[in-house]
Every structure is written in structure tokens, then in C-alpha cells.
Image: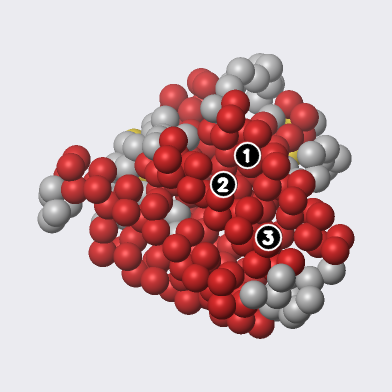
Amino acid sequence: MAMRSAKRGPATRSIPAKASRAVHDEPAVATRKQSISEVIARSLEEDIVLGRRHPREHLVEQDLCERFKTHRGDVRLALFDLEKKGIIQRIPNRGAIVRDLTPQEVREIYAVREELEVMAVRVLPFPVAEGNLDRLVVLQRKHSAAIDAGNLLDVFYSNLHFHEALFGLCQNTCLIEAIELLAQKTYGIRSYANAFPEALDQARRDHIDMIEALRASHRDDLIALARRHLKPSQEAYIRAYERRFGESGA
């Protein structure tokens, strides 16, 4: 991502949000200014989501300083933010690397994600207001358009916003936060399923079916869809991991 050169200064410097890919936020136009560290974190997160950076790949601070025309303080703040999300890890005397989730860790995370998302569906109040359904339809169409355009970054964000709106309907703040936290840990997994057109088409159909289940107040159908929807990314990542590192991950 090309950016203007920034003079060295304190880590609290900020740039307009429109200068970064934060325009993918929902709503589309963000008015808050982003700090340099937030821009770096967002850019690295997108690199990982799109498969531009792979598990165990080193994130060299000096390289990032040169790329973003800034100093190590900003870079370290960005890496700290990504580490909190579980997207990268920092190893003593080795620096930061893209987090390497083993197949067992992925299975454990997805098992918990599945139960949390099913819980959200179980407590979601029916009937769903027409305005909420309309919002989900708009987000589904954005996701579908991104798939047709082959824009995987927009696919990621539109999918993210769809599920935030969907699980937000449960109205349980603690549950919503737990779902979002575990979703963040699997950002690096999304690119593996998104590489297959049939997986994207299935995700598109699932979203349409979820809206129809909500509209008809068919809770059991929505639960089945929530369980099925998580499987392609998990399975694609595990297959790719074992091809690359073997089952032991050595």
C-alpha cells in the first residue's frame, strides 16, 4: 500500500482515515483519524487475510519502517495490536512472525466458535425486524458483488460485516465480543478457502439461506447453516498446513 512519507515524530501522529484501506469499514466513511500504527496494523492484517504473508513468515521491523516511512515506535505499536488479536506472535530473540496455528489449535478454535455462534442463534429474538433484514440483504449483495468482481479484500470485509450484523441480532454484548475475538484469531485462515471459487459460491448461498431462515423465523435451519458455514475455511487451512509442514507441523 503506497503512502506519503511522514516526518519522524511522536507515536501519536495521525493521518486521515481515507488514506488507508479503512474505507472498508462499515459505515463506509470513517471520520476519525488513524494513527500511523493503526494504518500499519490494518495493512499487515490485510496482507495476512489475503495470503500475501504466510504462517511463520517474519515481520522485520526495519523493513516495515522503510515501507511506511516511519520509526520503530509506530511499528512496534502495530505489532503489539496484532499480537493482542492473536494474528501474529513475537518470539524472544527472533522477533515477530505471522502466527502459526496448528491443525489441533484450529480445530479447538473452530469448535468454540461454532458453539458460540450457535448460542447466538439460539437466543436471537424472533421475529427479526424488517429493517435488520434489509441491512443484511444489502451486506449480502456487497459480498456477492465482491465475489463476482474477484476482489478478495472486499470479499473479506463484506463477509465480516455480514456476520457482525447477523450475530449482533442476539443483543448479548458479551457473546458478541467473544465471537468477534475468536473470529480475529482466524483471519489468516480465510484466504485458504477463498482461493477456491466453489467455496466462495457456497458462502454466498449460505448468506442468502441465512437471511431466508431469519425472515421465516426458522431457528433450526439457521443453526444448521451456522455450523456448516464454518467448515470450508477450517478444512482448507488444515489441508494446506499439512501439505506444507506435515501433520506434525515440524
According to the picture, the residue beneath numbered tag 2 turns out to be 204
Report the colour scheme.
secondary structure
Q: How far apart are marks 3 and 1 (CA)?
A: 14 Å
- Whole-angstrom CA distance, mark 3 to mark 2, is 11 Å
Q: Position of residue 151 (x, y in %)?
A: 57, 29
The tag earlier along the polypeptide, 3 or 1, is 1
Amino acid bearing label 3: Ile
Does label 3 or label 2 sit earlier along the sequence? 2
- Tell me the element at label 3: helix
Tell me which amino acid carries mark 2: Arg
Q: Position of residue 25 (x, y in %)?
A: 72, 43
* Badge 1 amino acid: Ser
Q: Are marks 3 and 2 in contact (CB under 8 Å)?
A: no
Structural distance between the alpha carbons of marks 1 and 2? 6 Å
* Left or right of 114, for residue 16: right
Label 1 with label 2: CB-CB less than 8 Å: yes
Give residue 218's position: percent from left, percent from top.
Answer: 64, 75
Query: Which image quadrant: the N terminus?
Result: top right
Q: How many marks?
A: 3
**Mark 3 surroundings: few (<14), some (14-19) or many (≥20) residues within 10 A:** many
Residue 179 in sight? yes
Q: Mark 3 points at which residue?
A: 211
According to the image, label 1 marks what residue?
144
Q: Residue at x 40, y 51 (%)?
A: 233
Q: Which of marks 1 and 2 is nearer the N terminus?
A: 1
Does residue 71 appear anywhere in the picture? no
Of 154 and 78, nearer the camera is 154
The tag on residue 5 is: none
In which quadrant of the rendered view does residue 121 lie?
bottom right
- Using the image as rendered, state which of residue 40 and residue 191 is in the foreground: 191
Q: How crowded is mark 2: few (under 14 residues within 10 Å), some or many (20 or more)?
A: some
In terms of depth relative to the viewer, which is nearer, 191 or 215?
215
